[in-house]
Amino acid sequence: MNAPASSASSAPPHLGRDLTLYLLARFALVAVIAAVLTLVGVPLLVALLVGLVVGLPLGMLLLRGLNTRVTAALAERNKHRARERARLRAELRGDRLDPESTGAAAKADADADDSADDTGSGDGADDTDSGDGADDDSGPGKARE
């Protein structure tokens, strides 16, 4: 039996570094805005709130390159995980897949999962309303009628 790939090998080599840099840069941007507002005389809590509101969209503009790298690395990691999941499912079914066909198998598995989620049993067993229009209220008011 093949040894499973480690979770560290599924991530692109610089994902952790880029994600950490992006997160720290966003926090630093909020801190700088809050510090400038505090120096001007704005109360600290208000300065932090304004820093958050202004810093989030400003960070998207100023840190666009880093955001693009993080997004691309996450997309690559997700592709790798989908390939590994398809390979594992095929192995559990007893199929043998070529490494090149794993991508197509991942898409087929994802499509099969989506169609299985969309189709129900159709028997209506989970419906709470019987549809006959009768109320199930058997309270004291119903017993006197």
Image (spheres, rainbow, N blue to C red):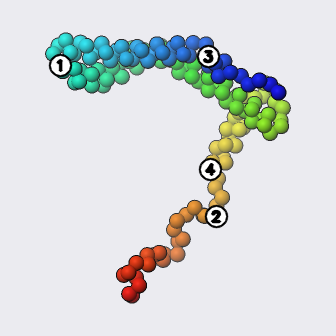
* Comes first in the chain, label 3 or label 4: 3
Task: Give the label on residue 42, or none.
Answer: 1
Q: Name the element at disc 3.
A: loop
Q: Is residue 139 visible?
A: yes
**Residue at x 57%, y 19% (from the top left corner):** 73
Question: Which mark is drawn over residue 12?
Answer: 3
Q: Name the image quarter holding residue 40.
A: top left
Q: How crowded is mark 1: few (under 14 residues within 10 Å), some or many (20 or more)?
A: some
Identified at 53% across, 71% down, the residue is 131
Label 3, label 2: how far apart the Cα atoms are: 46 Å
Q: Mark 2 belongs to which amino acid?
A: Asp
Return the disc, 3 or 2, that comes first in the chain's sequence. Answer: 3
Q: Which residue is drawn at 68% across and 21% down?
A: 6
Q: Kindly report the distance in space between the C-alpha atoms of the residues bearing marks 3 and 4.
A: 33 Å
The quadrant holding residue 141 is: bottom left
Residue at mark 2 to residue at mark 4: CA–CA distance: 14 Å
Disc 4 versus disc 1: distance between alpha carbons? 53 Å
Distance of label 2 from label 1 (alpha carbons): 63 Å
- Say whether marks 3 and 2 touch (CB < 8 Å): no
> Disc 2 designates what residue?
123
Q: Is mark 4 on a helix, strand or loop?
A: helix
Q: Earlier in the sequence, mark 4 or mark 1?
A: 1
Quadrant containing the C terminus is: bottom left
Q: Do the residues labelled 2 and 4 touch (CB within 8 Å)?
A: no
At label 4, counting other C-alpha atoms closer than 10 Å, the crowd grade (few under 14, some 14-19, many 20 or more) is few
Sequence-wise, the earlier of marks 2 and 4 is 4
Against 84, is 68 above or below?
above
For badge 3, the amino acid type reads Pro
> Which mark identifies residue 118?
4
The quadrant holding residue 103 is top right
